Amino acid sequence: MKRIRIILIASLCTYFVAAQENDDKALKDNYCVLDEVVSNLSTFDSSGQILMYERANPFHNKQKIFTKEIFQELLFYPQIDTAKINHLIATLDFEYLVSQHQEVQNWDFSKIDSKVGKYEGTPEKLDGVQRFEIAKPIYTKDRKMAFVYYYKTCGHIQCGSSMLMIYIKKKKRWKLYEQFGVPIL
């Protein structure tokens, strides 16, 4: 009986250590992807820096974006690489993407290598300042592709947009694969 208890305790310890390692890897991936997102977005700003909210966008309505029908509509956008979209349609598990639970979290700006500043105002503040609300990445089952939803506001009435950026992991680095506009959620 004592032997079984020891084996059970050892198994549980191994399980919790592995779970913690997976959580640490996932958190590291989140910041690696976010760093690439910020780097891509900062190319549109003359200062090379973007302002973003500390609180991650909750991305509640994933089911409105992660559908085969929405991705098929993208085939009619002239600026979209249709071969990439057809590949996504054929290979993505849309149900899996929708089912991923995202906890509301704050971004830790000290873990981002790119130039990013914390926006201190509220979303309702009309100050003319462009700022971003970026969601935590959603990954494919194999964790080789990440989807990042962001909302950008210009700080003026009815001035904003939202995008879905798709990143692919190659040689341990996240690279922008495709991006397209989506409805503001």
Image (spheres, helix red, strand yellow):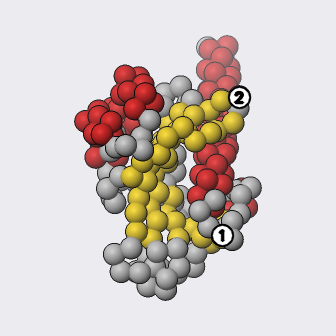
The amino acid on which the numbered mark 2 sits, given as a three-letter code, is: Lys
| In this view, 89 is above or below 73 | above
* Residue 44 appears left or right of 183: right
The amino acid on which the numbered mark 1 sits, given as a three-letter code, is: Ser
| In this view, 162 is above or below 148 | below
The mark total stands at: 2
In this rendering, which labeled residue sits more in front, label 2 or label 1? 1
Q: Secondary structure at mark 2?
A: loop
* 164 or 74, nearer to the observer: 74
In primary-sequence order, the first of circles 2 and 1 is: 1
* 80 or 149, nearer to the observer: 80
Q: Residue 75's x, y, as percent?
A: 33, 36
* Residue 87 appears left or right of 110: left
Where is the C terminus found, in terms of image quarters?
Answer: bottom left
The residue that mark 2 highlights is 171
Q: Residue 127's x, y, as percent?
A: 49, 86
Q: Residue 15's x, y, as percent?
A: 62, 27
Label 2 environment density (alpha carbons within 10 Å; few <14, some 14–19, many ≥20): few
Label 1 environment density (alpha carbons within 10 Å; few <14, some 14–19, many ≥20): few
* Residue 72 appears left or right of 59: left
Q: Let me know if residue 13 appears in the view.
A: no
The residue that mark 1 highlights is 46
Q: Residue furthest left?
A: 69
| Tag of residue 122 | none
Spatial separation of the CA atoms under disc 2 and disc 1: 30 Å
Residue at the location (71% across, 58% down)? 114
Where is the N terminus found, in terms of image quarters?
Answer: top right
Residue at the location (35% across, 32% down)? 94
Q: Quadrant of residue 67?
A: top left
Residue at the location (47% across, 45% down)? 179
Residue at the location (33% across, 32% down)? 95
Q: Secondary structure at mark 1?
A: loop
